[in-house]
Amino acid sequence: MTRIFWLKTLKNPLKIRSFTGPQARNYQQNMKKSTAPRLLISTGMEENDVRYATGLSAPDPFCLLVDPAGHLHLLVSALEAARARHTCPRAILHTPADLFPGETPVRRRLEEQVLALVRRLGCAAVQVGPHFPLGLARTLEACGVKVRMTNAPPFPRRAVKSPEEIAAIAKAQRAAVVAMRAAIQCIHSATIDPGGILKLRGRTLTSTHVKEVIELALLARRCAPEQGTIVAIGPQAARPHDSGSGPLRAGVPIVIDIFPRDKDTGYWGDLTRTVVRGPAPASIRKIHCAVLRAQQLALAMLRPGVEARAVHCAVAAFFRQAGFDTRLAPPGRECGFIHSLGHGLGLDIHESPGLRHEPGRLVAGNVLTVEPGLYYPALGGVRIEDTVVITPAGHKILATCPKKLET
């Protein structure tokens, strides 16, 4: 990850490295007078908040404490200390040996390490997010540290991407476009047997084979083909997150959803197209046309200051007026436009802001997907998705790809 990304979220990072003597006592006195610091653990839903702030990603969970002045305290193992100093040079580093000086080296549980750090800094209370580990929170409270839960994001500026972040997402998106073209070319090259099954070099073309084509194209561009790449046909495609399986057929919509993660930066791309090998039924052509027009409608609305839910609602209204009904119940039998119009994209595949029925206005620097879709079990599904950045003048698609239905 490019290390400068976290600088915009913090003010006056502390330049000192050590934390002893009068300096530590003064710090503790100031902490007691101020707002509780934010405590994060680099695992689960908090992992990418920590990576955003520090640039550091590691196999084992580690701790980040952000004090009210914006100083970063990183608690890492001795194995990671040198790398942490290199990756996040202005952070104040703590290790188990530093927190437990003079003791026989033993493996310390994360709960013990975090408690020792909180006590060293004189924190009577900490703030944690809704995804903070419950066991760790209870340990802190049992030892006299108040744990206050907050829904506020630790780094709200994550929703506004820097030029470096936009470039990282665009790189992943370009890889997705290359992989999409390879997948569609693979389907186009297939022949159609008398039963409508696609054949490639005499063998049945399957969802798995097309996924392998996608993965190879992504790996060649240093992007990780995350599990879940979608090549879904017919009724499978009517379930938006069904990854798809089995033989591919002619005359049936195939939804291809590619969401690679760049190995160097950790940023995601996201791209979806729907194709049909050979002539498409009139019903599918009609649905594809409606989805394409819905995306065009949404894209025309994207600019700073627009309320995100207004864009989602405009697309939902367009589908209703075009005669495409939506049913959200009973569970498992939903159909029509059954998901939000789009989601934010960055270090997480789904992050703020979203194009959904929630308040909030778009600002320049937001990066999000625009992916209207219609799903009917008897026919299949159709989805078209592009990733865009909101610019001062409107929006920009980060990487273009054809949207032709028939191949």
Image (cartoon, grey):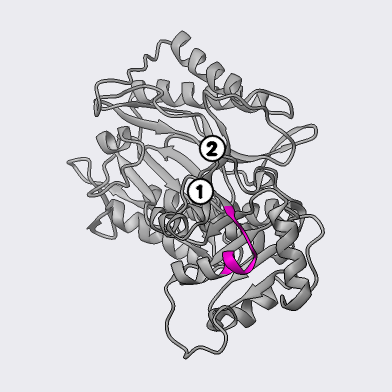
Left or right: residue 219 compared with residue 281:
right
Tell me whether circle 1 and circle 2 mark residues in contact (CB < 8 Å): yes
Q: In front: 130, or 397?
A: 130
User: Residue 282, percent across and down?
Assistant: 35, 21
- Residue at 41% across, 38% down: 275
Is residue 122 located in the magenta-colored stretch of the structure?
A: yes
Residue 339 location, x and y as percent?
42, 29
**Residue 191 drawn at (x, y percent):** 30, 49
Q: Name the residue located 26 percent from the left edge and 27 percent from the top edge.
A: 377
Residue 352 sits in quarter: top right
- Checking the image for residue 343, the label placed there is 2
Reading the image, the residue beneath label 1 is 349
Which residues lie in the magenta part?
Answer: 117-125
181 sits to left or right of 21:
left
Between 284 and 30, the residue placed more toward the observer is: 30
Q: Examine the rendering and report whether any part of residue 27 can be seen.
A: yes
Percent coordinates x, y for residue 251 in the rendering = 30, 34
Q: Residue at x 76, y 53 (%)?
A: 8
What quarter of the picture does the N terminus occupy? bottom right
**Is residue 71 visible to us here?**
no
Query: Distance between the Cα atoms at labels 1 and 2?
Result: 8 Å
Secondary element type, mark 2: strand
